[in-house]
Amino acid sequence: MVQDNSNTSKPNLIEIFKTNVEDESTANRTVNALHENFKNVSANFDLEDCDRILRVESMDGNIMLKEILHFLTSLNLKVELIMD
């Protein structure tokens, strides 16, 4: 019997960024803007972390890293990818 793997989904990927976001209002606006412009991602902030972490998770196994970094800097945010 041949197994059909065509419906196998890619695992979700998560990228973590250090940011300069300091308040919940800016964090909420940023998350909403990410969700509007990148339909395949889910994003959230951890403002209690000293690096004011932004987590971006792909829903389809693909994160357009360059585009997301460019988008965030266009919002006048300082962002730095945290490498594993």
Image (tube, helix red, strand yellow):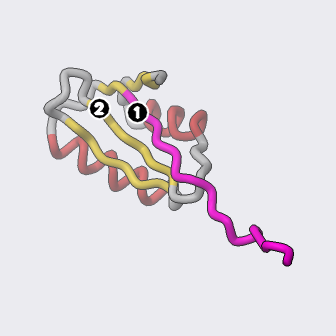
The image shows residue 12 at horizontal and vertical percentages of: 52, 52
The image shows residue 35 at horizontal and vertical percentages of: 42, 57
Furthest residue in direction right, as rendered: 2
Identify residue for label 2: 53
The amino acid type, in three-letter code, at marker 1 is Ile
Nearer the observer, 81 or 26? 81
The image shows residue 84 at horizontal and vertical percentages of: 47, 24
- Quadrant location of residue 82? top left
Furthest residue in direction bottom, as rendered: 1
The residue positioned 45% from the left and 30% from the top of the image is 73
Nearer the observer, 12 or 82? 12
Report helix, strand or loop for mark 2: strand
Left or right: where 51 falls relative to 38:
left
The image shows residue 77 at horizontal and vertical percentages of: 36, 29
The amino acid type, in three-letter code, at marker 2 is Ile
Mark 1 or mark 2: whose residue is earlier in sequence: 1
Identify residue for label 1: 16
The residue positioned 85% from the left and 74% from the top of the image is 2
Q: Point out the image quarter for the N terminus.
A: bottom right
Circle 1 residues within 10 Å: few <14, some 14–19, many ≥20: some
Does the CB distance between marks 1 and 2 fall below 8 Å?
A: yes
